[in-house]
Amino acid sequence: MHRLPAWVGLGSGVLAFTAGTMNVFTLESALHQAVTHHSGSSSSMMLALSLGHYGLALRFLAIILAFVAGSVLSGFIIRDYHLRLGRRYGVSLMIESACILVAWSLASERPFATQLLLAGASGLQNAMATTYSGAVVRTTHLTGIYTDIGVIVGNRLAGIRSQPGKLRLLAGILAGFLLGGLANSLLFPYLGNGVLAIPAAITGTLGFGYWVYRQLYLKPRGQVADTPAGDGAAPGAP
């Protein structure tokens, strides 16, 4: 794996921060349900089904499907799962920001709709890019991050060197997610539902900034890639 550019690590960490903020918000507010990852939701759905709580099982199913729908939308917009400059990440991030803003407006009166919107936003973000030169890039949950860090540490104890920059990338995502959750916990008593303005502002600003960069810098130089290409290919490669 080639050395990871700084923008990959920084962007992944910032997006993980927004996911950590959203997830703790849904746990700390009246929603009481994680939305950025769904192993627990799937298990809870099966438990509710086994107990005959069919309405509750359907609610869990709807949240999971909202996450999947966000991933589908990301796949339609970006048209690949390898991270590289030139793809339409700006559009995805601005849509995510809009979903969070709408969720904020509905949080007090329509909590379930808020859950669905935040789950969709999380799916959209998580599916924006899953790999960069062999490194897995996931920004809305930590199970895989903890696993990969453990494997790298185990390999190093065995005298095997990891790919350059991979541990730094994983540590950045981990730190971002944890700091996002901490920020929400500290600010929620003061801002309430308004704490959702933080991830909305971050994703909206990143999305608009990247969209401008893509229009003004990448397109004139022919570095826009709207069709799938192999992992590690240069932007715009067929």
Image (cartoon, rainbow, N blue to C red):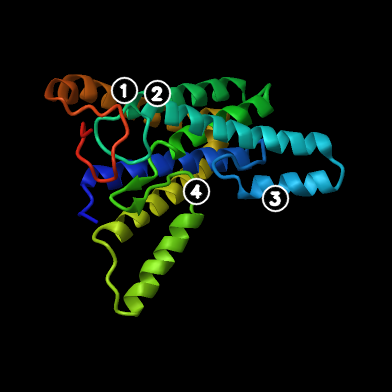
- Examine the rendered structure and indicate whether residue 15 appears above or below residue 118: below
x, y percentage for residue 111?
Answer: 67, 28
Q: Is residue 119 visible?
A: no
Instruction: Kindly identify the amino acid type of the residue bearing the numbered disc 2.
Output: Met
Looking at this view, name the residue that lies furthest to the left. 221
Residue where numbered disc 3 is placed:
43
Q: Is residue 22 left or right of residue 159?
A: right
Mark 1–mark 3 distance (CA, rounded to whole Å): 37 Å
Front position in the image: 128 or 106: 128
Of the image marks 1 and 4, the number of the one nearer the N terminus: 4
| Lower sequence index among marks 3 and 4 | 3
Residue 151 lies, with reference to residue 108, above or below; the image says below
The amino acid type of the residue labelled 3 equals Ser
| Residue at the image position 23 percent from the left and 51 percent from the top | 4
* The N terminus: image quadrant: bottom left
Mark number displayed over residue 208: 1
Type of residue at label 1? Phe
Q: Earlier in the sequence, mark 2 or mark 4?
A: 2
The residue pinned by badge 4 equals 141
Residue at (17% x, 20% y) in the render: 216
